[in-house]
Image (tube, grey):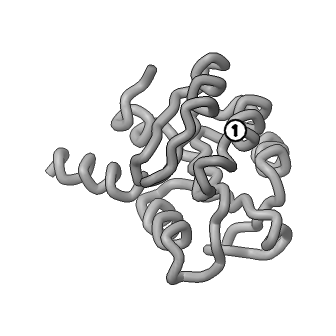
Amino acid sequence: MRTIEQILRTGSNVAVVGLSSNPERTSHHVAEYLQQQGYHIIPVNPVYAGQQILGETVHATLQDAADALAQNGQRIDVVDCFRKSEDIPPIAKEAIAVRAGTLWMQLDIENQKAADLARAAGLDVVMNHCMLIEHRKLDAGAA
């Protein structure tokens, strides 16, 4: 299993599940930060499907996002989850189906069943950590 540092250094395509168009929401703030750091943000939220958030087209499902990336020979590296803990198992199954590299559950989000499922399929798993906070720690350590 790769470390958080390895995941952040190598994962460039980040599917943000539950990304909100509201700039006041944590998902929007984190995605915007990651985008500013050079990550390619792929919004996934059926409520906004077909619209734009942070200049990127929103996809209804991870499969739709993966299909769009595959047209350019790319894949989802990290599935960053902004959903309730109990909503994670179906997202884990989708992440496995699209062959994502990592299932990342944001702060206060933990689901052991989903984590075990994803790990068994070869995905790296991070629970209860914020990508923005972890990236800032990485930057601080490099300074």
Residue appearing at x 51%, y 40% in the figure:
11
Q: Position of residue 46 (x, y in %)?
A: 82, 64
Q: Position of residue 67 (x, y in %)?
A: 84, 44
Residue 115: image quadrant is top right
Name the residue at 44% across, 66% down.
33
| The N terminus lies in quadrant | top left
Vertical placement of residue 74 versus 54, above or below: above
Rendered location of residue 59, percent (x, y): 80, 60
In the picture of the structure, the residue carrying the numbered disc 1 is 89
Q: Nearer the viewer, residue 117 or 37?
A: 117
Closer-to-camera residue (93/84): 84
* 14 vs 121, nearest the viewer: 121
Residue 12 visible to an observer of this rendering:
yes
Disc 1 marks which amino acid? Pro
Rendered residue at 65%/47% (across/down): 86
SS of the residue under disc 1: helix
Residue in the image at 49% along x and 70% along y: 26
Q: Is residue 114 left or right of residue 60?
A: left
Relative vertical location of residue 57 with respect to residue 142 in this rendering, above or below: below
Residue 63 in which image quadrant: top right
